[in-house]
Amino acid sequence: MLKDILISLVQFILLFFFQVLVLDNISLWGMVNPMVYVWFIILLPYNTPRWLTLTSSFLLGICVDIFSSQMGINAFACTLVAFIRPLLLNAFSGNIENTFQRPSASRLGFVNFLFYVIILVAIHHLTYFLLGTFALNEIISVLFRTLISLAATVIIIILCDAVFFHKQE
């Protein structure tokens, strides 16, 4: 259990700094904003208590908000993803023998993992861009930015999953 906590803490710190120091400074054409820090929520072990998932997701979001001068948008989007995550895990994971494991393509199967990631990232990005714009007359722009950023984020997450979790069963 201590090992899982330490791994999650290191992932939290690394993804946070990668987001605020690297990805937040990349904005392709003002439309593509990869937000890979969501991978932290996606990677939490199956047995993570719900209160801990919600709390750590909120803390990650608020930390990103502070460093990107936002007003709780990331915190809300991350907390929403953490709230929905158990439903999707149940839908895509089937019977998991070891609940200390983390969701990955090798454990869920590539297609199930891909849909799991796409749905959670889409919820995050749509929430983030809707709250950031907060204008329904910009809905086409919001949907376009969501789709483009979703594609970039999912590609990065899938590539990272392939690099870090390719041999684990």
Image (spheres, helix red, strand yellow):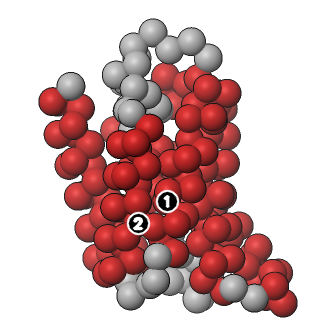
Residue, x 47% and y 44% (percent of image)? Answer: 42
Q: Residues within 10 Å of mark 1 (few under 14, many from 20)?
A: many
Residue located 61% across and 17% down the image: 94
Disc 1 residue type (three-letter): Cys
- Quadrant housing the N terminus: top left
Q: Which mark is residue 168?
A: none
Say what secondary structure mark 1 lies in: helix
Can residue 123 be seen in the rendering of this structure?
yes
Q: In this orientation, which residue lies closer to the viewer: 80 or 165?
A: 80
**On screen, residue 81 above or below 77:** above
In the image as oriented, which residue stretches furthest toward the front? 51
* CA distance for labels 1 and 2: 6 Å
Residue 163 visible in the picture: no
Question: Upstream in the sequence, badge 1 or badge 2?
Answer: 2
Above or below residue 2? Residue 28 is below
Write down the residue under mark 2.
61
Residue 136 sits in quarter: bottom right
Query: In the rendered structure, which amino acid carries the disc numbered 2?
Result: Gly
> Is residue 45 shown above or below 36?
above
- In screen coordinates, is 1 left or right of 28? left
Q: Residue at x 47, y 32 (%)?
A: 104
- Please state the horizontal and vertical placement of residue 152, each as a whole percent of the image: 57, 64
Residue lying at 48% horizontally and 70% vertically, measured from the top left: 74
- Give the residue at mark 1: 78
Q: Position of residue 111 (x, y in %)?
A: 66, 32
Quadrant location, the C terminus: top left
Q: Nearer the viewer, residue 147 or 128?
A: 128
Give the quadrant of residue 97: top left
Residue 93 x, y percent position in the rendering:
58, 23
Q: Are marks 1 and 2 in contact (CB under 8 Å)?
A: yes
